[in-house]
Amino acid sequence: AGVYAITDDDGKYHIAHLDPGRHSVKLNLTMLPMGSSATTDRRRDVTLTPGVFTKVSFGVAVPDLTDREPLTLDGKGSGVVLGKEGPVYRAQMRNVMGAELVARHGEHQRAAVLKGEVTYIDLPLATDGEDPVWLLVERAADGRLWLSSFAVFTYQREEGGTLVVPWGPRPIAQLLLPPEARKVGTSKLRVIGSTQARVALRIHTSGSHETCEQQSESNDEELIDCTVAVIDRIETMRVQIDPAPDPHGIDAPPQILDIEIDVEPTSHFFVGRGVVELNFDPDDDFTEGRLGDALDWNAGGAFFYKGALKGGYQVSAGADAQARQVLRTKAGSIRSIGGIGAELLAHDPRRVFRDLDPETVYPAYGDASLTVDERESGGRFFLRVEKDESYVKWGGINTAIDDAEVGRFVRSLYGLGAVLRFGDDNADGDGSGFDLRAVLFAAQPDTIPARDELMVTGGTLYFLGHRDVVEGSIRVTLEVLDEISGLPVRAVPLIEGSDYEADYKGGRFVLDAALPQRFFGTSLTAESSGGHRGRLIVAYEYLASENLTADWSTGARVIGNMGPLSIGVTGVTELTGLSDDAGELRSRYWLVGGTARVDLGDPMRLRLEFAHSDGGAFESRRSVDGGLSYGEAATTAGNLGNAAAVELTTGVGDVKSGLYGRYVEAGFTDSRNALGKRLVQGGMRVSGKFATGTSLWGNYDHLETRLFDTGLLAPGSAVRTGLQVRDLGLVGASQRLGRFNVGVEGRYESEVKRDAHRALVGVEARYQLTSIVELSLRRRQLVSADIATENGGATGESAVGVIFDDGWRLAAEAGIDDELEAFGRAQGNVPVTEDTELYAGYQIASRLGVGLLDDGQASGSSVIAGGRRSLDDGTLLYSEQNLRVDGSERMLGRTVGARVPLSKQLGVSITYERGVLDNELVADNTVLRDAASVGGTYANGRWSVRLLADGRLDRRGNIRSAELAGHGRVEFRATDDLTLALGGRGGSGFRDDGTGDLGADRRAWEGAFGFALRPQERDDINVFGRYALVYERDRVGKESGDVSANANTDAPWLASTSQVVAAALVYDIWGPFGLSPKLAYRHTRIHMDGGQGTDQALLAALRGDIHVTESWDATLEGRVCAVPNSRVDSTAGALVEVSLLVIDWLRMGAGFNFSSISAQGVRCNEPGARGLFIRAEAVY
């Protein structure tokens, strides 16, 4: 249903982790190298039994460009002969590989003649004094192409007569192209081969806009690997080639070769099967003689499709479902219609395909193949249809409704998602086109959405409000907030892997580069040097600690663009119910919204947004210390509200103005706006520059806020939860006089509710010392104030500053107030070299900086310093330290790490992160978090090692918790035939509830050692062996899906240790006969409440396979299962199965399982396993 293997260079592969039962394995011809073909059946239908290897091999003929003797001239059979058109040079060639040999020169072409075992070609002699250089083309039926240069030079003797001298053939290039007589379907055409030294090659196809060019500058043979996208049908491939001069200086001219091929921009691969099976249990106790009690049935099917369709569509789809799983519950009852649908579309968010399974997975398979699982998040069904920027998919989706300020909805879910775009490409250009974009989704979530608001601290390390985050669900957006209004002036989505790295299990992420706590701004009356602030909006999903109800999440956003006008509508609803029946679903949250935008460029830009929400969808938290502490989750009664945003900007020349307004009710919530805060805000801004060097600006901002829930605040914040009304106005002007620039600004603030106000004036003079250095002098004066502020009696302050800007930037300001208290700020980003960057920041907050409204944002002193170095060899070094002090509160952050390739084979990595939050006024409330990891890789021709260990320690007062985890793999290729491997992974949890003893909590570790013997020179024998150990410790009685560290603390501990030893052989006895013996032993010891028990089993199996033709298959497997050191009798039995391909698509089979041994693992007795079965399969 979507699991496939890409073989290694030797053609070997393995597919593990498959369930026992019937499977179809099919060779995908579209993935074979160009010109390859299958020499055996393309599909095998097999029965997989638990733990026993089944070998499926396919014969493939792969073209080899190097398997030939060079084309040479047979001097004895060559010479001048008289042809139909006069004297010609007959070149008799040896080692001709292609089905045809052709000589080309410009428009002229000569074909070779095959006469018996002799191949010759007649080339005319020069008559105009110029000897042509011919391009010899050998083309084989399988697509192989060889190009060579050949010439016949003529010289006139002084004594009369002509001297004829052949030159070549000299090899130029060898390519693997689509076969001439076969149609090829592919969305990407790949051409491979090689050229001789210093050869220039250019390849262009008629149905693609891409061109491959290669210029060899070395004296060695150059490999060619060229891939072009196939847009339309390709009928001609043009090869332009310029051979290099020979050692004597003879330089063959460039040649152009048009080659006929037939390539369609389509490819299809499909494998499918449907099965109906009837089972009869002869051991069933007939009740009242009813035969139905002994009969059981099952039906199901699976398919996988991957292809490219005309028009540029890419399609992947697959499904796998069994009636027993879909129609019946675990208790055996029949599901409802809704339950059947939910089971078909269900998935497991905790499923990890790479997990070790001691029952089924061997650590060594003796090959370097890659197993790919196309299934999305463990679902039974998946579908993806893509074209350009549009797609429709069922699987892992992101709702991606994030292009508006109000009415956002961002979740990572499993379900149906689509992005569709229609219209003209020039809809955003000259206004003549129309463009429509739609985002749609529908899903049944089984995770909880969270939204964390993290104010930028200046560091790189941030902790989320939850751990056990669903992998791939984190979406981080950086918002830059205006220094006057606090509204976002820019929103930038950050990309995982380039902008940040995430630890999903630990719930933290690290930015690739530090963001300043505050950017330098333009206001002369703002705190210190003012500037925009930054915040990170993080949306993610985390695993529930209990089973969720049957939720559904659906929504859509449609945006239409016509020239400068853009209209968008949004609708989202989340439904919940007490059962799987759709009739009992009720609305838990719904969101509707609309946007309108007009963009006429600088003359006018208008944005209107409105949204309405009912209910709550996100758990919202806010942190001002990098996630070391959070306020309580924001909630409020009566979750119902509206939100609106309007913004208008105009510009005439250098004069620009803007109006804005925001309205958010306390009951409104979306992915960006949290519950519990009522906001009314409006204002205007004007700025202008004039030819005389004069600049004018002005701002007015009216703000009304009311907080209904302290969860929006940082812990311990003194922000008032009542109504606050603030008005702020400022006006300023500056004049440039040569290198000087003098500015003045006045600011007035009032808080209407408390009848408080203050006024400030700022004056600044700047001097452009050089083209990269600017100096400044600033004075800020408190003119009036009728409310006690935190300025300690200071009424004014003065500061000097400097800015360096020469590809790197350093800005600094230092000052002192009238009470001789110092303040200042510095931040810089200095690229020391091309690969090394240092950054630093320092701030002592001004006491005149506190406004009438405190938003909970810390404003104390801080310092940060760090650096990164990235080298071409892959070395990455980074380090950062930051400290912030705000009154009684201190926050410390530390990040250091390195990834260093010590050699071509050896690389190491190490990271350490620390976060500390300390409040002197709150006893025993210091938060300290340490996290570290160390890893290494080593690889050479024989050894491959990957190791990684990481841990985390959290402390809050005298409460401690810790986690230690690791995974690794060591593989040793003792010979080309024998591979040894050791692998393991796991984790342990520890907890101290204040007793001083950090005791063990949860534990889960597993590991395996094994070997694989797969001889290179013979394919008839393969041997595998393994030893696996699993240890688990957890509390009993947990609810399904409970991943919390301390769930059910009153429940007893349950610890189990399981060991499995197994060996298996796969041997082809002769022709169609194969043999697969296996021996496995499992021993499990269980401890609980001081008691213990043991469970063990010994299983021996001997399997024989007969694959006579594609039509006939037979399997005979004998099994013996015993429980050593117990009174349980040994169980023996056999499985016999025969199947016949009746017609091309129908296979009938029957068999008898004489054993009650489990079909799922090493267990000796499983009810219902024994009996007769009859099966009908539709296969393709």
Image (spheres, grey):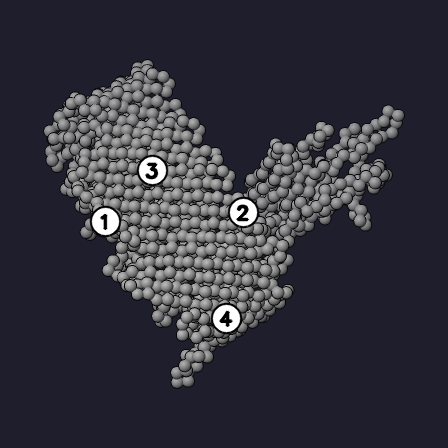
Where residue 1079 sits in the image (x, y, percent)?
50, 65
Residue 500 seen from this side: no
Q: Are marks 3 and 4 in contact (CB under 8 Å)?
A: no
Residue 341, quarter of the rendered image: bottom left
- Residue placed under numbered mark 4 in the picture: 1119
Which residue is painted at 55% across and 65% down in the image? 1076
- Residue placed under numbered mark 3 in the picture: 895
Q: Secondary structure at mark 4?
A: strand
Q: Is residue 820 left or right of residue 870?
A: left
Q: Amino acid at mark 1?
A: Gly
Q: Of marks 3 and 4, which one's residue comes earlier in the chain?
A: 3
Q: Of marks 1 and 3, which one's residue comes earlier in the chain?
A: 3
Which residue is painted at 78% across and 40% down in the image? 73
Q: Is residue 1011 left or right of residue 616?
A: right
Where residue 849 sits in the image (x, y, percent)?
20, 29
Q: Nearer the viewer, residue 763 or 288?
A: 288
Please tell me whether mark 1 or mark 2 is closer to you in this view. Answer: 1
Q: Of marks 4 and 2, which one's residue comes earlier in the chain?
A: 2
Q: Which mark is residue 942?
A: 2
Q: Amino acid at mark 3?
A: Thr
Q: Amino acid at mark 4?
A: Arg
Which residue is painted at 30% across and 29% down in the image? 841
Measure how far apart labels 1 and 3 are at the Cα level: 28 Å
Q: Amino acid at mark 2?
A: Arg
- Residue placed under numbered mark 1 in the picture: 996
